[in-house]
Amino acid sequence: MEDKGLRIVSRSHHNPIEIANTFYKMATEVLKTDKKAALKIFRSVLTHNPEHTLAIEIVASLLIDEEMWRLAEPHCRNLVKLRPYFAEGHFLLALVLHNRSSKRAILAEAMKEYELALKYNPSHANAHFGLGELCTRHVDSLRHYRQVLRLSTDAEQRKLVLERIDSLRHFMRVERCLTASA
């Protein structure tokens, strides 16, 4: 498969868009069996066409899967720049920011990106989960976690959210008791 793709690429060497598209097709096939090799090919796509948004999204996602937050960030920022109304781009950027730093300003930017993801796709369960994790007010967290329960079909995520809701409810009860006794 790779040799055939390279022959096609060499015949169309005058057109970078064709080269990028050929590499993209090759990369999607390789992705089924070898993520690391596919990542290299997707990066070749971006060498020939830096605005290939499908390749940008996949490169960002592959880097996120490997928890390579700093390497994924520029791809996510580029995706948001090229497709400002694409909810998944905002979600990926939020996820990267959320996981790469605990600095208040970066977490505030992550919240903004999660909110933009929800603006463009109100049913984005993972964006609700991210906001639930970052909200400073317990009632806001509960509201987002409840949305995750309504939207998500992922059993593992639903279980985690139920645990978070139980913890928040317990914490809120303790908080009320402490406030009442003060």
Image (cartoon, grey):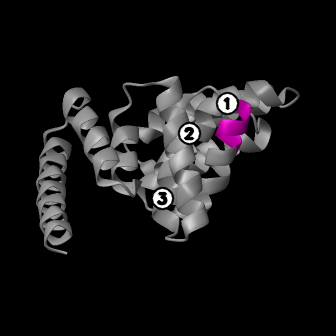
State which tag comes first along the sequence, 1 or 3.
1
Residue where numbered disc 1 is placed: 84
The alpha-carbon separation of the residues under discs 2 and 1 comes to 8 Å
Residue where numbered disc 3 is placed: 98
Vertical side of 18 occupied by 171: above or below: below
State which tag comes first along the sequence, 3 or 2.
2
Residue 98 visible to the viewer: yes
Overall secondary structure of the magenta section: helix
Instruction: Identify which amino acid the numbered label 3 is placed on.
Output: His
Residue at 39%, 53% (x, y): give it.
Answer: 135
Which residue is at the front of the view, 140 or 175?
175
The alpha-carbon separation of the residues under discs 3 and 2 comes to 12 Å
Residue at 64%, 34% (x, y): give it.
Answer: 23
Q: Residues within 10 Å of mark 1 (few under 14, many from 20)?
A: some
Left or right, 154 with reference to 28: left
Q: Which residues are magenta?
A: 78-83
Corner quadrant of residue 80 = top right
Residue where numbered disc 2 is placed: 90
Secondary structure beneath label 1: loop
